[in-house]
Amino acid sequence: MTAPTIADRWRAVRATVDRACAAAGRDPAEVTIVAVGKRHPAASIDEVAAAGAVDVGENYAQELVAKQAAVTAPVRWHFIGRLQRNKAKLVAGKVALIHAVDSVELAVELGKRAAALGVVQPILAAINVGGEAQKTGVAPADAAGLVAALRAVNGVRLDGLMTMPPPADDAETVRPAFRALRALRDGLATPASPLAVLSMGMSDDFEVAIAEGATMVRIGTAIFGPRPSP
């Protein structure tokens, strides 16, 4: 049998997202699929865009810059990885959303760089609901303090929260993490800053994330296939 193309995989993911939304009583328009192109070539981004993808995420600042120069499709770029402050200049003001801001210092640097370009940079606060030392994000107990501080930073706009729970063989085991992030958001939202975006869910668990309120799911392998070796 012929291996599925990126376009085939995109359509399958799109259909699965639509079914998950229907099962949760949600409008599919509420959930944005961010196609994660980490280590895949620029040609693959053009291919998925031709199939209908609009939003594309990258994990590494220098890879993002290179692909922005090479990709011809008019995609909306997201930066979803851990960002060092010294790389902020490569990303700030140049992407639609930065998903994993876990410190005021990083936000200040992003805001300064964005303001120099005459724009405001949308960001998400990274919350480490799984408590894994290697994962970016603050502990849920520290989320209120981070959110309050980020709301006060000039040059950025806090649009919501993101998380990456521990990997699991059974997606149901991470449901509590997704539920916890939504509950945390609900407790921190204000009329002026509703934190509407919940970025949670990846290739193995995005259906559960949608059931628990995800508004963005970050899908790599299920769309692009196995990731090339570094």
Image (tube, rainbow, N blue to C red):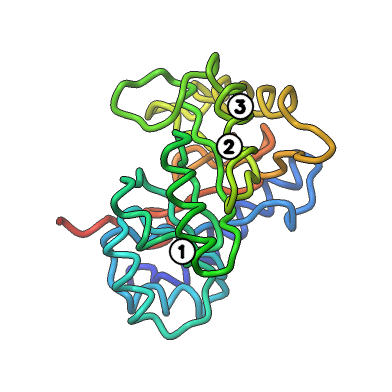
Residue holding disc 1: 9
Which mark is first along the chain, 3 or 1?
A: 1
Proximity of marks 1 and 2: CB atoms separated by less than 8 Å: no
Give the residue at x 38% y 32%. 136
- Which residue type carries mark 2? Leu
Give the residue at x 26% y 61%. 39
Q: Is residue 59 left or right of residue 122?
A: left
- Which residue type carries mark 1? Arg
Marks 2/3: CA–CA distance: 17 Å
Label 3 crowding class (10 Å Cα cut-off): few <14, some 14-19, many 20+?
Answer: many
- Which residue type carries mark 3? Leu
Query: 141 or 151, which is in the foreground?
Result: 151
Q: Position of residue 50 (x, y in %)?
A: 51, 81
Q: Position of residue 174 (x, y in %)?
A: 50, 24
Q: Is residue 136 left or right of residue 22?
A: left
Give the residue at x 65% y 46%. 159
Residue holding disc 3: 181
For the residue labelled by badge 3, is the local secondary structure a helix, a strand or a loop?
helix
For the residue labelled by badge 1, is the local secondary structure a helix, a strand or a loop?
helix
Query: 197 or 31, which is in the foreground?
Result: 197
Which mark is first along the chain, 2 or 1?
A: 1
Marks 1/3: CA–CA distance: 28 Å
